[in-house]
Image: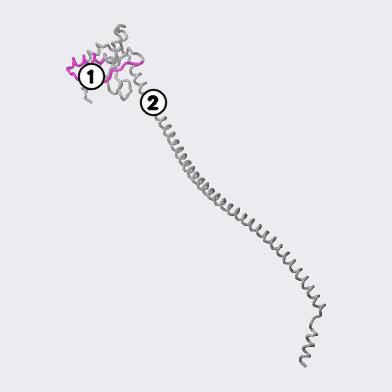
C-alpha cells in the first residue's frame, strides 16, 4: 500500500514534459532579465562613483580654499594687530609731543612775562639815569660865575673851596656819583688851535695832579674824575678827591 501511495504522489507531483520545458524557458528568460538588471546597476554605481569622486575632489578643493582663506585671515589679523600696535605707539608719541608743546607754550608765556617785566624795569632805570644825567648837566650848565682857569684851580688850597666853584649839594641835587664832591670846569676854548689837541682829560689830570701834589707835598693825591663834556669838547670837568689815594 505504501509503495502505491508513493507512486501516486510521485506521479501526481512530477511535472510533465510540457511543464518542464515551460519552466526551463521561464528560468532562462529570468536569468537574462537579472543579468541586464545587474549590468544596469553596475553602470549606475559607476556613475554614482564618478559623481562621488567629483564631489570629493570639489570638496577637497573647497577645503584647500578654506584653509588658504584661513591662513590669509590669520596673516591679516597679524597685520591688523601690528597696525593697531603702531597706531597706539603713534598715539602715545603724539600725546607726549602735545605735552611737550604745552610745556614749551607755558615756558614761552613765562619768558614773555619776564621780558615785559624786564622791559618795564629797564624803562624805569633809563628814566632814573636820564633824571640823574639831567641833574648833573643842570649843575654843570647852571654855574652863574665864570669858569675858573687852570691857574685858579692850581692856586686853590686842597682843603678850601674856590669861590667860583659850585657843588652839587648847593644846587639841591644829590646824584650818587657827585654827592658832596667839589668840582670845576675848565674852558679850553681860548687855547690856540695848534695846541687844542693837547687839551684832553689825560693831560688836564696830569697837570692838575702834579701841581696839587707839589703844593701839598702829597705824592699820592689825585683827582676823583676828569671828564670831557660830550656836547662841548673844550669843556673839561674835574671832580676833586676828598682824601689820599687808596690802593685797589
Q: Which one is earlier in the sequence, the residue at label 2 or at label 1?
A: 2
Tell me the residue at 32%/9% (across/down): 189
Please indicate whether residue 91 sits to the left or right of residue 192 in the image.
right
Q: Residue at x 30, y 10 (%)?
A: 197
Q: Position of residue 242 (x, y in %)?
A: 23, 22
Q: Is residue 61 left or right of residue 229?
A: right
Using residue 115 as the reference point, say whether residue 160 is left or right of it: left
Helix, strand, or loop for circle 2? helix
Residue 77 drawn above or below residue 154 = below
What x and y, as percent, mark residue 181?
27, 21
Residue 217 horizontal/vertical position (percent): 17, 17
The part of the image, by quadrant, that contains residue 180 is top left
**Membership of 211 in magenta stretch:** yes
Q: Residues within 10 Å of mark 1 (few under 14, many from 20)?
A: many
Furthest-left residue in this view:
217
Q: Does 99 sit above or below residue 157?
A: below
Q: Which residue is mark 2?
A: 126
Snapshot quadrant of residue 66: bottom right
Residue appearing at x 35%, y 23% in the figure: 132
Task: Check the image and report above or below for 137 versus 50.
Answer: above
Position of 90 relative to 210 (above/below): below
Question: Which residue is nearer to you in this view: 19 or 182?
Answer: 19
Secondary structure at numbered mark 1: loop
Give the numbered dot on residue 143: none
The quarter of the picture where the N terminus appears is bottom right
Point out residue 30 in the picture as x, y percentages from the top left corner: 77, 71
* The one of 139 and 34 positioned closer to us in this rendering: 34
Which of 202 and 236 lies nearest the eye of the viewer?
202
Q: Residues within 10 Å of mark 2 (few under 14, many from 20)?
A: few
- Labelled disc at residue 222: 1
Residues drawn in magenta:
204-230
Amino acid at each position: 500500500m505504501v509503495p502505491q501511495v508513493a507512486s501516486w504522489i510521485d506521479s501526481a507531483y512530477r511535472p510533465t514534459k510540457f511543464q518542464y520545458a515551460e519552466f526551463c524557458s521561464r528560468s532562462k528568460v529570468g536569468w537574462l532579465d537579472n543579468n541586464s538588471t545587474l549590468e544596469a546597476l553596475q553602470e549606475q554605481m559607476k556613475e554614482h562613483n564618478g559623481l562621488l569622486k567629483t564631489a570629493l575632489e570639489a570638496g577637497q578643493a573647497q577645503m584647500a580654499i578654506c584653509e588658504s582663506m584661513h591662513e590669509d585671515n590669520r596673516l591679516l589679523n597679524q597685520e591688523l594687530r601690528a597696525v593697531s600696535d603702531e597706531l597706539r605707539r603713534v598715539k602715545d608719541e603724539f600725546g607726549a609731543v602735545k605735552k611737550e608743546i604745552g610745556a614749551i607754550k607755558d615756558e614761552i608765556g613765562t619768558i614773555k612775562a619776564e621780558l615785559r617785566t624786564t622791559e618795564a624795569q629797564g624803562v624805569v632805570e633809563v628814566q632814573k639815569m636820564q633824571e640823574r644825567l639831567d641833574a648833573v648837566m643842570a649843575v654843570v650848565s647852571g654855574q652863574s660865575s665864570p669858569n675858573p682857569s687852570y691857574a685858579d684851580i692850581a692856586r686853590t688850597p686842597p682843603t678850601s673851596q674856590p669861590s667860583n666853584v659850585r657843588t652839587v649839594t648847593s644846587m639841591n641835587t644829590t646824584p650818587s656819583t657827585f654827592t658832596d664832591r667839589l668840582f670845576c670846569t675848565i674852558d679850553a676854548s681860548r687855547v690856540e688851535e695848534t695846541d687844542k689837541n693837547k687839551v684832553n682829560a689825560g693831560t688836564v689830570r696830569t697837570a692838575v695832579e702834579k701841581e696839587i701834589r707839589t703844593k701839598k707835598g702829597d705824592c699820592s693825591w689825585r683827582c676823583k674824575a676828569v671828564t670831557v663834556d660830550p656836547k662841548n669838547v673844550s669843556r673839561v670837568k674835574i671832580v676833586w678827591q676828598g682824601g689820599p689815594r687808596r690802593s685797589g
